[in-house]
Image (cartoon, grey):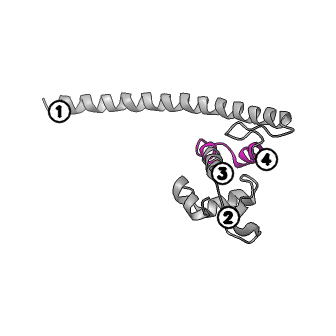
Amino acid sequence: MYSISEVSKITGITAYTLRFYEKVGILPNPSRKDGKETGRRRYDEGDIRFIRFIHGLKQTGMKLEDIASFAKDGCLLDLDGREMPDILDSLHLRMDILDKHIDWLERQMEHLEQVKTVALEKKAYYSAMLNDRSK
């Protein structure tokens, strides 16, 4: 089991952000030391995998509201493949969210490729100018 500061170091996500994600429902409430609501948060490997996945969605531009919808009621099908009850509606919602996000990512990648192409053309142009001046 890991403390919030250990999870912060492992994942690179600040303790403040972890608490915020918990507060707004993006992360489920972690277990607490001694089982007390005011006890220190305790995280296991499954929690860390889920936190990394959620953070990855955020880093790729997914909106917090979509992440919250995705994470609503926790992961009903966790990353170890253990199935939980009543998952069909949730799975369809998650699939829709991921499909939309993947489409958005593909459009972003196309745009970045276009920007990269222009940058490479400019670099080649400037390089040619420098070569001409050194002759």
The quadrant in which residue 30 appears is bottom right
Residue at 74% over, 54% down: 28
Indicate which disc, 4 or 3, sits on the residue closer to the N terminus: 3
- The residue that mark 4 highlights is 72
Q: Residues within 10 Å of mark 4 (few under 14, many from 20)?
A: some
Q: Quadrant of the N terminus?
A: bottom right
Which secondary structure lies at badge 3?
helix
Left or right placement of residue 92 versus residue 34 in this view: right
Q: How many marks?
A: 4
- The residue that mark 3 highlights is 47
Q: Position of residue 117 (x, y in %)?
A: 43, 27
Q: Work out how far the residue at label 1 is from the one at label 2, CA to CA, in angstroms.
A: 64 Å
Q: Is residue 56 magenta?
A: yes
Magenta stretch, overall SS: helix
- Please, what is the three-letter code of the amino acid marked with disc 4? Lys
Q: Work out how far the residue at label 3 is from the one at label 1, CA to CA, in angstroms.
A: 59 Å
Indicate which disc, 3 or 1, sits on the residue closer to the N terminus: 3
- Please, what is the three-letter code of the amino acid marked with disc 2? Arg
Query: Can you say whether 81 is above or below 41 in the image?
Result: above
Q: Residues within 10 Å of mark 2 (few under 14, many from 20)?
A: many
Q: Position of residue 40 (x, y in %)?
A: 67, 68
- The residue that mark 1 highlights is 133
Q: Residues within 10 Å of mark 3 (few under 14, many from 20)?
A: some
Q: Which residues are magenta?
A: 55-72
Which secondary structure lies at badge 4?
loop
Q: Position of residue 131 (x, y in %)?
A: 19, 30
